[in-house]
Image (cartoon, helix red, strand yellow):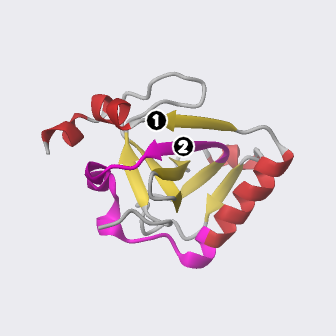
Amino acid sequence: MNIIPGQGLWLKGRFANGTQCDYNRPFLVIENTGTIIKALNVSSLRGKETKLIIPSNKNLSKHFPPFPQPSFVKLDEIYHYESFSELEQSVMSSGKCLDTGLLSQVISWHSLYSSENRTWTVDMKRSELILLNPIFATT
């Protein structure tokens, strides 16, 4: 399976402020260059509905698949993951993708937001992803 735009990834990583996230969280793949997988941070809406008033947060109206809970996407940070075969183990919902129309809208939202606002990029190499997600090292 190739990781493709619209799929969700379930990973531990770093936040844009540099702090380590000690729990798995969802990310939405928006591009795969072959060497880099670009993804946006996704968060559950549960108890955080008011966060949708922040311009960098957009509701995923058709969240499932790949995200099981009502969710929003964060446009102010983008994650660049070094691509490697074991990363496919983190794909959510058996590889099912977000609605294609909504994915196109998310990509447009991110492009527009990043052209008008400051955004943060989090680069993560294979070695760091394996360190934070030991399941990758066992294959």
Amino acid type, callout 2:
Tyr
Please, is residue 83 above or below residue 2 in the view? above
Who is closer to the viewer here, 32 or 100? Answer: 32
Residue 100 shown in magenta: yes
In contact (CB < 8 Å): disc 2 and disc 1: yes
**Residue 120 coordinates in the image, percent (x, y):** 67, 36
Q: Which mark is residue 124?
A: 1
* Secondary element type, mark 1: strand
Who is closer to the viewer here, 115 or 47? Answer: 115
Give the crowd class for mark 2: few <14, some 14-19, many >=20 residues within 10 Å.
many
**Residue 132 coordinates in the image, percent (x, y):** 32, 30
Q: Which mark is residue 79?
A: 2
The residue under the point 62% across, 37% down is 121
51 horizontally vs 40: left or right: right
**Residue 32 coordinates in the image, percent (x, y):** 49, 59
Magenta span of residues:
75-103
Amino acid type, callout 1:
Met
